[in-house]
Image (tube, rainbow, N blue to C red):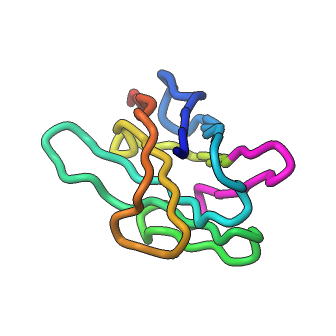
């Protein structure tokens, strides 16, 4: 069983930065495609970013491209999301997700961490 635990959320002023982390246990971390999704109040969950097992390929939603950076440390079984120049519309619960392959709906999910950006 794969377990994912997010941390690093909080309250930040617009223009500020936060770094989210996702600690992963279970099967070999480097075999998983990892992703970040988010869900704002009253909205559907949306894709934010994805990274392949080796970390060699990354994908971003247009809304975060140039501001967010996804990375992973396979030695530490940890996924990261560096979020810069945050905007109020980035306010959401952020979830990390894992799957052996690229899927729109990954198999494994964390419990989420709240990010609130005030204007």
Question: In the visual, does 66 lie left or right of 77?
Answer: left
What is the x, y in percent for residue 98? 52, 57
> Could you say where residue 36 lies in the image, as x and y percent from the top left?
49, 54
Quadrant in the rendering for residue 70: bottom right
Q: Residue at x 59, y 66 (%)?
A: 33
Which quadrant is the C terminus positioned in?
A: top left
Residue 68 lies within the magenta run: yes
Q: Residue at x 57, y 60 (%)?
A: 34
Residue 69 horizontal/vertical position (percent): 65, 57
| Span colored in magenta | 66-78
33 is higher (above) or lower (below) than 14 = below
Left or right position of 117 against 3: left
User: Of all residues shown, which one is farthest toward the front?
Assistant: 1
Q: Is residue 21 magenta?
A: no
Count of all numbered marks drawn on residues in the image: 0
Above/below status of 75 relative to 70: above
Q: Nearer the viewer, residue 80 or 82?
A: 80
């Amino acid at each position: 069983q794969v377990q994912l635990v997010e941390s690093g959320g909080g309250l930040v002023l617009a223009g500020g930065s936060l770094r989210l982390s996702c600690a992963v246990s279970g099967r070999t971390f480097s075999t998983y495609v990892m992703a970040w999704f988010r869900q704002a109040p009253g909205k559907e969950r949306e894709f934010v970013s994805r990274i392949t097992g080796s970390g060699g390929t990354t994908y971003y939603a247009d809304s975060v491209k140039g501001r967010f950076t996804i990375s992973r440390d396979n030695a530490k079984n940890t996924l990261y999301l560096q979020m810069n120049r945050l905007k109020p519309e980035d306010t959401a619960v952020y979830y990390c997700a894992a799957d052996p392959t690229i899927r729109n709906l990954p198999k494994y999910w964390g419990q989420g961490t709240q990010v609130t950006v005030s204007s």
